[in-house]
Amino acid sequence: MKAIFKLPSVLLILCLSAVTASAQPQFTSYDDLPGLNKSYKPAYSEDFPRWAKMLYTTTVNFNDISREFEAYMKKHKGEENAIIRYFKIWSRAVESYVLADGAIVLPDMDLYFRKLRETQTGAGLQVRSRNTSNADWTFLGPKETFWLNESGSAPPRPLVPGRPMFILSMWRLPLTTSSIAEQKPVLSIKPPIRG
């Protein structure tokens, strides 16, 4: 009875190990460069063109992969998919590390992140040490602000009976119309009359 259960479990383990042994690695050391987001890289597919399969190998010549990509794009004008998008992002991030012969020299990532952290920390210290006093600041106004009807009370009555009062923005201004010609009324703003 135990032998019957052992045989399927052994076969299952062998099948899974064969599948994982033949699988193409998803990420390479190039995918750790600054400016690249690993999650944008699509899963490897045997249907990818040759230049796309190169993105999944550990040593890539930038000139070769770029040449193949350009040839592919000439044949497939206007095509857009995830691997093409990733190649464009990848080539932008990698091109600053490419030598004249196309070899890609990877930087020491620990040193890179240490220098980045020092630079960011230094920038923060410079901001804090800057003079932040407002000694040269002068107040221009407005010196008095009138808020309209915050209390919810009835709207104010016009200052002069018979003249309508309109509210523009947050200022109270009486508005009147006068006609210069019969057909063209003109809107004029007059200061409030107190008294």
Image (cartoon, rainbow, N blue to C red):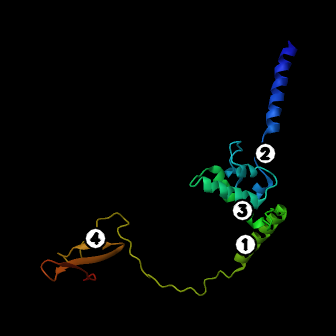
Please name which of the two marks, 3 or 1, marks the residue nearer to the observer: 3
Q: Is residue 179 above or below residue 22?
A: below
Residue 156: numbered disc: 4
Q: Which residue is mark 1?
A: 124
Residue in the image at 80% along x and 38% along y: 22
For residue 36, say whether it is visible: no
- In the rendered structure, which disc, 2 or 4, sits on the residue that comes first in sequence? 2
Q: Position of residue 161 (x, y in %)?
A: 18, 76
Among the 4 quarters of the image, the one containing residue 13:
top right
Q: Mark 2 to mark 1: distance in Å?
A: 40 Å
**Which dot, 1 or 4, sits closer to the camera?**
1
- Of tags 3 and 4, the one toward the viewer is 3
**Residue located beneath label 2 in the image:** 25
Quadrant in which residue 195 is drawn? bottom left
- Residue highlighted by disc 3: 93
Q: CA distance from mark 3 to mark 4?
A: 66 Å
**Type of amino acid at the residue the image marks with label 2:** Pro
Label 1 is placed on what type of residue? Gly
Query: Residues under labels 2 and 4: Cα distance?
Result: 77 Å
Q: Looking at the picture, how far across and down is residue 25, in whole percent?
A: 78, 45
